[in-house]
Every structure is written in C-alpha cells, then in structure tokens.
Image (cartoon, grey):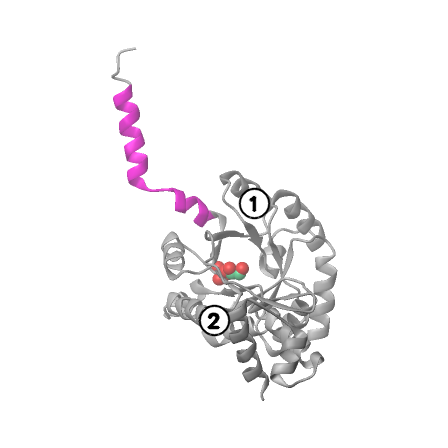
Amino acid sequence: MFNSQRHEEILKVLEEKGSITVEELSKSLKVSPSTIRRDLEEMEGEGLLKRTHGGATRERKERVRGMKIFLDTANVEEIKKAKDFGIIDGVTTNPSSIAREGKSLEALIKEIINIIDGPICVEPVASETEKIVSEAEGLVRLHKNIVIKIPITPEGLKAVRSLSKKGIKTGVTLAFSSSQALLAAKAGATYCFPFMGRLDDIGQEGIDVVRDIVQIYRNYGFGTEVIVASIRNPLQVEKAALSGAGGVTIPFNVLEKLVKHPLTDEGIEKFLSDWKKVPK
Ligand code: G3P
C-alpha cells in the first residue's frame, strides 16, 4: 500500500471513530508502528490530524473565525499608529521594508515585538535550505511570535518542511500560483502569502489565484492559512475577504483608506452643522 493510500485509510478511520492508536493502525494496515508514527507526523504537518500519546485524533477544520489583518511594514511609527486602531493581528516584514528603516534587523524586530502581541513575520535572506533553517532558528530565538517567511523555491520548500517538523511557524511568500500554494501547504506552512497586487500589476486577476488557493485548501482540509499580500487598495481587501481567505497583510496607507468614505465625512459635517442650530 502506498503512503497516500495509508493516509486516506487513516483519515477514514479518524472520521468514523474520532481517535485511533498506533497499535490499532499498525495491525489493520499491516505495517510497522514506526511507519504509522511517520505517517501521523506527516499528516499532522499537513494539519490533517493531531497526534496524541500513542495515537492520533481528527483535527476538526473549523471555519476561520474572523479575518486576520496584518500590517505589512517594518516602520515602528506606523505599527504604533495601526495598533491604536485595535484591529491588527500581526506584522509582516520583508528585506525591502527592513532595509528602508536603517536599523539592524534584530533591533527592529525587538521594537516591533514590544508593540504587537501577535505573529511577526520575518524573512531570512539565505537561499540554501540549511542556511535558511539556521537563520530561521536564530530568528525564532528572539521571540516565540516570530514566523519565518520563506520565498517559494525548491530549497525554500525543503526549509519550510524542516522548520514545520521542528514546530517553527512558517509563511511561504512570493507565491503567484495555486500550484505553488499547494506545495506550501504540503510542506506544512502555517501561512501562504499570495501576492495579489503584483499579479494585478501585470494584467492578471490576482483574486482568481487567491480564490483557487482558498478552494484547494478547503478541498483537502489543509491547515495553511491564506494571507493575501501585496495589497495596494481597499478594493483588493474586499475581494480577499469575499474569497474566504484567512486574512490580508496591508500597508498602513491602505488601513487608513479602509476607514474612510467621503459620504461618511459629508454626513458628519452635516450632523455637526445641524447640531449648532439646536437651542442651547
Ligand atoms: O510583504 C510582501 C508584499 O506584501 C509586498 O507588497 O506592494 O511590494 O508588492 P508589494
């Protein structure tokens, strides 16, 4: 029996019974307990089940509760202002946004961590698996909220797999197709960041790719969350929300624009001028 067939069987049993032991699976599937343990580990990495002592339980995929809104910047002033909105779940940075701030990566990350209590996504700059992993291990030592953003390449995917096995949270970045996103989920990424704006820039409908990724993840119950990135305007945020993506990561200027509407401003002005006519 192939690995994938065994995984299917394990899922079926878990669906029926809710939980199962390694011993039971080893007997019914006629493979060694160590093979079953490896299966369970892989399937847990894909978010399909939860390992328990001596077995596994079904990971019930619940609908994402509430859309995540991350701030896509490394600018501390913007992060402080955005925090005051009271709706920011985390921060995403990248080598370009870090470079704009003129501070060391470590100093910057420490400042950001003190402002936002949520995932802080940081991108190693190494391109070979081992170097990415060792850079990532250094970064996660800074704080438990650090998530490692890794561009989708063969070396990057191997790093995602290796880090997710170690329980380190990862986000696959620079994703432009649903096949890249599929591989990200298989590798056990916590987040996948499709770059909607850059696809729109080259005349492709970025939202179509986002919708496909959301559907693919649903089809297979992948635990990887889709956080739509490279967002330049409120319309893209609305489209991302309608697609059922887990969230968006937005620059500060888009956050400000999301709040604004000219009719709201006009309405407030009218209320206030009418209020002046009320006898005091
Ligand atoms: O964090 C990466 C991504 O959001 C970059 O966006 O505007 O440079 O395409 P952009």
Q: Secondary structure at mark 1?
A: helix
Q: Quadrant of the C terminus?
A: top left
Position of residue 260 relative to residue 244, above or below, is above
Residue 105 appears at what percent x and percent y? Answer: 69, 55
Rendered residue at 40%/59% (across/down): 240
Position in image of residue 157 (x %, y %): 61, 74
**Which region is colored magenta?**
253-275
Toward the viewer: 18 or 264? 18
Q: Is residue 233 visible?
A: yes
Q: Which residue is mark 2?
A: 176
Q: Is 261 covered by the magenta stretch? A: yes
* Circle 2: element type: loop
Judging depth in this view, the residue of 280 and 63 nearest the camera is 63
Q: Nearer the viewer, residue 166 or 123?
A: 166
Give the residue type at disc 2: Phe
User: In the image, is the residue at mark 2 within 8 Å of ligand 1 by its beta carbon?
Assistant: no
Q: Are marks 1 and 2 in contact (CB under 8 Å)?
A: no
Classify 10 Å Cα crowding around label 1: few (below 14), some (14-19), many (20 and above). many
Image quarter of the N terminus: bottom right
Residue 45 % position (x, y): 61, 70
Q: Closer to the N terminus: mark 1 or mark 2?
A: 1
Count neighbours of disc 2 (C-alpha within 10 A) and say few if under 14, some if 14 to 19, many if 20 or more: some
Give the residue at x 48% y 72%: 220
Confirm whether residue 128 shows in the render: no
Q: Is residue 41 left or right of residue 7?
A: right
**Most common secondary structure along the magenta stretch:** helix
